[in-house]
Amino acid sequence: MSDLGCYDENLSGYLDGALSSEEARVIESHLQTCAHCRDTLNRMQALSSAVRQVPRPEASLLLTARILSRIQTPEIYAETPLNKLLQSWGLLNLLVLGTLVILFGPVLLEVMRVIVKHLVIVTSLVVKLSWQLPLDRTNLTLGLVLIVGAMAAFYGFGRVFSALSREGTIS
Amino acid sequence: MVEVSLIEQVKTGDLTAFEKLVQGTQQRGLNIAYGILNDPLDAEEVLQEAYLQVYHNIGKLKAPEAFRSWFGKIITHLAFRYSRERRRFKTVPLDYVRQVEDTFIDEPETLVLKKEQQDQMINALKTLPDEYKAALILREWEDYSYQEISEVLDIPLGTVKSRIFSARKILLKKLKEGGF
Ligand SMILES: [Zn+2]
């Protein structure tokens, strides 16, 4: 008979050992007289062991390393407006350089070859020339802009590259 | 069980201790995330995020003994959010659910292979609402007590009891033809 004593929710709780001793005692004595509830309990038990048998994926070996690297390098990768600007600057420079190499590759290579071959002469010439340049405001500013611009381009491109490798596009 | 002394070390910002904590708890964490999301890659994604939160917020964990509940809470919250966002982008559900229901209700087979039974179970689990899945998985896979589940999910004990029961009832109904 499945009458007033049948209370499935408590059977589920009974299975998990989550009932008070009084509630458990009531269920146990009910189970002795009710085939319907015995059957339900058996099915819930079978279900419970089947759920426990469901295969789970194993944590990948690299998981710990990935988590640690994310903790150690948080802010550098933050997408602030300044960082975005630097990235664009880096990419623009790379683009210009790439275009120059494609258009004048052989000529540039020849110039490089000459410079390397006569490195001593070229260096002394450059040093001599730079001494002759007046150290006025215009020249200083120009030098500063060139240096900062190059550094920013390097940094910006470095960021683009590391962001790409973090995404796994480059390995 | 995570040692209290290890938690105290992690609180000081000790990365070696944190690494030990991750290694000791990641499989359990992954099980919970996978139980809710049913996708290994999504589960790892959520787990990584969860550990970042653990690292940055562990100072707020007053009682180190409560780590298990606290950790479970972080993972379930993130997994629920991930699941909601995923649903917004992937529009499979309705057809898929109907297809799953068909396999369970209209199949008169009595002799089912073990592997097949497992697949049926996984598919049935997928159809449960996230909140039911979480309660059931914490109980069955990670042996959380009803008290712990109520802390993790922020629901009263009675609700834990009825959610686990409802999850089981739905599963039994879906799997009835599968031999359960
Ligand atoms: Zn009964």
Image (cartoon, coloured by chain):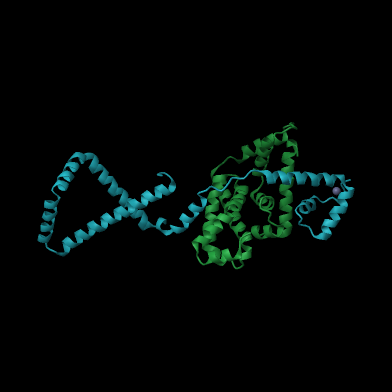
- Left or right, A35 with respect to B135, comes to right
* Residue B93 x %, y %: 61, 41
Residue drawn 64% across the image and 49% down it: B130
- Left or right, A141 with respect to B23, comes to left
Q: Quadrant of residue A21?
A: bottom right
Q: Nearer the viewer, residue B128 or A33?
A: A33
Q: Nearer the viewer, residue B92 or A103?
A: A103
Q: Is residue B158 above or below residue A47?
A: below
Quadrant placement of the N terminus of chain A: top right
Q: Nearer the viewer, residue B112 or A65?
A: A65
Chain in cyan? A
Q: In the rendering, what colour is chain B? A: green
Is there any visible trace of residue B170 in the rendered image?
no
Q: Is residue A68 above or below residue B175?
A: below
* Residue A75 x %, y %: 42, 59
Residue drawn 63% across the image and 48% down it: B35
Q: Nearer the viewer, residue B29 or A148?
A: B29
* Residue A97 x %, y %: 25, 46
Residue drawn 43% across the image and 49% down it: A166
Count of marks, rendered view = 0
Q: Quadrant of residue A46?
A: top right
* Residue A43 x %, y %: 78, 44
- Left or right, A76 with respect to A21, comes to left
